[in-house]
Amino acid sequence: MMLRILLCCFAVWLTGGWLPAMAAGLDELEQASRQPAGPPPQRIVALSWEAAENLLELGLTPLAVADADDYRQWVVRPRLPAQVPSAGSRLEPNLELLASLKPQLIIISPTLLPMRASLQRIAPVLNIDAYQPGQDHAQAAERILLQLGRVLGRQPQAQQRLQQLEQGFASLRRQLQAHGAAAWPTVQVIRFANPSMVYVYGSNAMPVLALRRLGLRTTGQPAPSVWGVSQQRVGQLLALRQDIVLYQQPFAAAPQLFASPLWQGLPFVRQQRFAAVAPAWSYGGAASLLYLAQGMTTALLQLPIAAASRPALR
Amino acid sequence: MSAVITLLLPATGRGWRYPLALCGLLGLLSLHLWLDGGLPPAAQWAQLWQAPVDFNGLQFHYAALPRAAMALLVGAALGLSGSVLQQLTGNRLVSPMTLGLSAGAWLGVVLASICLPGVLALHPAWPALGGAMLALGLVLLLAGPQGLNGLPLVLGGMAVNLLLGALATALVLLHDQYARNLFVWGAGDLAQIDWQWTLWLLPRLSPALLLLWLAPRPLSLLRLGLAAARGRGVAVSSILLLLLAALWLSAVSVAAVGLIGFIGLVAPNLASLLGARQPRAQLAASAVLGALCLLGSDCLALAFSQWAGDSLPSGAVTALLGAPALLWLARRNLRPAQQAAAPSSVVAGQRRWGRGGWLLAVSLLVLLTLLSVCLSPMADGGQLRWVLAWPEPLLWSLRWPRSLVALSAGAGLALAGVLLQRLLRNPLASPDLLGLSAGGSLALLLASSWLGQPLLQGGPLLVLAGSLLVLGLLLWLGRRHGYAAGMMALSGIALAALLDALVQVVLAKGTADSFAVLGWLAGSSYRVSGAQALWLSLAVLVLGMTALAAQRVLALLATGDGVAQGRGLMLERVRLGLLLLVALLTAVVTAVLGPVAFLGLLAPHIAALLGARRPVAQLLLAALLGAALLLLADWLGRVLIYPRQLPLGMLASVLCGGYFLLLLCWQRLRRGGGR
């Protein structure tokens, strides 16, 4: 009897929980950009940080941004004007506040899809899924900026910004090539969880995609999680013995780990192929990709391997 | 490995035990080093005596060896601490984890990492010790002097565990960026990068030797009872000193490696199972077996990490193995007499509840409802302004589902609490202690992390399925014991611990989902739709009516099993039916809202304190109070840190838990200066 009830529950859950998820597979932004309805909205709320970044890159100041204070601390670039208020947290934005702001458009990420019905009552909702599994996130980021430009009536700005970003990449590429980057080994990016645990970025993560766009050799292994990282112990980093390894700051326990004999014994540390990258947001949009690339280029050019081939230029 | 020893030892002679344990230890150590450093056992011996030349050597000397040493030290410390606690209380179900000491230590560390990061870096042990002492004080207060050797101590420990855990989660949620680095640590990870922590821990474990030397005499005298022991010259101060030493051992372990549960529970029980009778033999054997158990679990964690490529914290493995062990121990150790022995109510009032009271309560609830719907802050160009007005249609459509859910969930949990406390005749029983909400949360977590389904999609039904599954398990486990109180509560504790371990694993993965998980576990009314709110209130109404209809049965149950049976009550069937009712109430609430702790514990008590002691009166008044409390928590959560919001469940847990403890303190103090 119990079993039968449970089975029924399971069946109900299957039909109730999974069917809507399948229907959401259609890309909403693409549809919206094909048939823009009426005049482009001006009063826009961004409930995800990549949406806030894209709006700012298009020259639009959002009406409110979720977790605005944390955005200013963690994403930093592009700069969010100080008068833009916080719309609550990214997981639970404040609906009453949103209602009082009377926005014309609310941009969300898939995390907030369950809240769509409520948000829809306040203003039209646009869901941007920037991190669909199995796609090239860098290409997707460019497509999203372009399509968002079309939806918001700012297509020229979007195209211009994409050109600027491409020029930025080209100049970074030239700098790296001048230092013999073509002959460099594979470059890996990591982030520390604590002194004994690291996250290694896989080929589906933004920092690695930025490296690839810089013309550098990178890992071909995608990480298992949607967020593009795999968790490893410090000792497992030995597998990266031939590579250049960059780590994303901040890392509070750096002095303890970097002083330990185990760390000093890692080949890439002994041979000085290890450098720190200034903090940048690794789950952002097209512009974040360039900011990541800038930070990593600066770090790479300070390595001895870059200095070795410097005479070719000067 | 330890299972093999369990099988072997009783068969062999007494003299063989220690050599055999030593052989087992060495074998396990070698296996551990092999799994961690990659060096086969033969090469390990050679490597041990030479300076490291390559990275494998470094790995062996600075990662594998310290990790193994850490496992041995922490395991021994926890085993010893558990053994002292068990011998002091004469209760086989006591351990640093079941008493909530680990949760207290964890809270201390979280608090220190947010408020005083400098202190935490320099003196990691003191915040942990402070937290653990706080937890112990609370547990002793909750259980009372008579409850030390029975279920009340374990239930009190669980309640403290829940409260302190909720507080720690609240702090992590509010200060996510600071606390982020604590996640892996919180899961109890033994990985090392040098000898620093091992060398830190080693001198701090020196009280262990003193314990082995000095503790046996008072412990053996204590077996005669506290009064007899004092008559023979055991000072109370020496007992306190023993307690402090046990606390210290578990606190430094938590400070060094994070939360590792169950070792302190399992090791002393294994020791007595293997025939260690005398206090000193029990202490020594618990230390050795604790070391063995942790080393063995860590071997499993390492093997799993290599097989799956994703690292599994050691604390999660001990919880996975320990939860079933707790159930098994409970079945061996809980005798029916112990299960029944509990005071009928922790708090008692002299007041009588009259008609005027009902009028007052109902009008207060109505007023509170009006306030929560009408009064709210508004952001007005950077300024906060309070608005008291009937909300416009849009705001109304956003507000009423939350208020309705808070009202009906509060009433539902309070009803479940009354039923459960009357059914189990235990004032510390509450729906969250049965592990029903833990089961629901577990189902959601498993679906999101292993099926790759986004968290919170298709949530409610999944949670309902999980809760019902737990109920099925409880009923299956309880059938042999006639659905007795102790068994049910302990199953709940085991499940809650299991959930805790899995939550830590998911958090340790460090993805953005971590905060979604934490947010859901904090119990939020944010995602509730109007339809869900209506369904919930309807379900609570129907189930509440059923509960009211069962008032005659409840009144009979209060007279005791014998009398009830004499009047023709089919005890087993009644228990089954009432349990089912409690489970359904808890499941529907958890499915919509997420877990809410303490409300189901507190509301029945306040109702009894106000004078509502007959079943119908207590059910109704508790439901009113529960609804009012949860409504208040929801409103506070919306306005306290506007525009951000505090989850309702977390706020309710902290408020109700804090109030409950205050109430108890007050009662105990009033009854003539404590004990």
Image: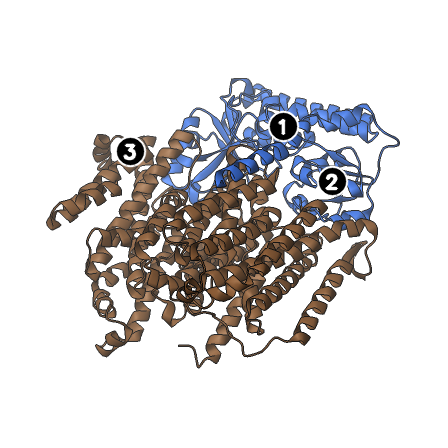
Chain colours: A blue, B brown
Residue beneath disc 3? B34
Tell me if I can see residue A231 in this picture. yes
> Label 1 sits on what residue type?
Gln
At which x and y percent is residue B288?
A: 24, 50
Q: CA distance from mark 1 to mark 2?
A: 22 Å
**Residue receiving disc 1:** A132
Amino acid type shown at disc 3: Trp
Circle 2 chain: A
The numbered mark at residue A117 is 2
Circle 2 sits in a helix, a strand or a loop, which is it?
Answer: helix
Left or right, B1 with reference to A134: left
- The residues tagged by marks 3 and 2 sit, at their Cα atoms, a distance apart of 55 Å
Q: Quadrant of the C terminus of chain A?
A: top right
Identify residue type, mark 2: Ala
What crowding class fits label 3: few (fewer than 14 Cα within 10 Å), some (14-19), or many (20 or more)? Answer: many
Q: Residue at x 25, y 62 (%)?
A: B211
Q: Is residue A184 above or below residue B561?
A: above
